Amino acid sequence: MASKESTQRRAQRVRRQLKKVAGDRPRLSVYRSSKNIYAQIIDDSKGHTLVAASTLEKDLKGSLKTGADSAAASAIGKLLAERAVKAGIKEVIFDRGPYIYHGRVKALAEAAREAGLSF
């Protein structure tokens, strides 16, 4: 099991590589816990969250079986992309954080891409 320090180091390494190629695109950041998944689009130059979605939202919570599966991650990715397009955001850079691009993280990214967000 990874220690907290190595997890933070991995997340910082990924973020450092993203900043090199990001340009002026906002960052789509993903956090997954054992029971839920959260995603937000952040403007790093201003330090503001532009759009956010999570499995804890009331309109989604009733329709999902659990917040900790790929179906829930896909729903969050689709919802986040719809909100982003409505806010005028079409291009982002994907920040997976300390998580590997697999399972729930991959499902969220692919659903966001299918819903109109490009990265």
Image (spheres, rainbow, N blue to C red):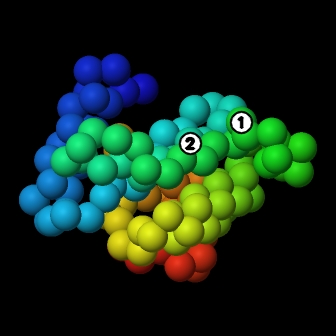
Q: Give the x, y percent position of residue 65.
A: 87, 46
Q: Give the x, y percent position of residue 64.
A: 84, 49
**Which label's residue is closer to the chain start, 2 or 1?**
2
Q: Write down the quadrant of residue 35 in the picture.
A: top right
Identify the amino acid type marked 1. Leu
User: Which residue corresponds to the image point at 61% horizontal and 68% vertical from the top-left?
Assistant: 82
Q: Give the x, y percent position of residue 80.
A: 58, 59
From what the image shows, is residue 114 above or below residue 112? below
Q: Give the x, y percent position of residue 113.
A: 51, 75
Judge from the rendering whether residue 15 lies leftward or rightward of residue 71; answer left or right. Answer: left
- Mark 2 touches mark 1? (CB < 8 Å): yes
The residue labelled by disc 1 is 56
Q: Is residue 46 visible?
A: yes
The residue labelled by disc 2 is 38
Distance in Å between CA atoms under marks 2 and 1: 8 Å
Q: Secondary structure at mark 2?
A: strand
Residue extending farthest to the top is 4
User: Which residue corresponds to the image point at 45% horizontal and 70% vertical from the top-left?
Assistant: 88
Judge from the rendering whether residue 50 lies leftward or rightward of residue 65; answer left or right. Answer: left
Question: Which residue occupies the foreground of this view, 43 or 29?
Answer: 43
Identify the amino acid type marked 2. Tyr
User: Which residue corresponds to the image point at 42% horizontal and 74% vertical from the top-left?
Assistant: 90
Q: Secondary structure at mark 1?
A: loop
Question: Which residue occupies the foreground of this view, 115 or 83?
Answer: 83
Question: Which residue occupies the foreground of this view, 47 or 93?
Answer: 47
Q: Is residue 110 visible?
A: no
Question: Which residue occupies the foreground of this view, 88 or 101?
Answer: 88
From what the image shows, is residue 70 above or below residue 35? below
Image quarter of the C terminus: bottom left
CA neighbours of label 1 inside 10 A, class few (<14), some (14 to 19), many (20+): some
CA neighbours of label 2 inside 10 A, class few (<14), some (14 to 19), many (20+): many
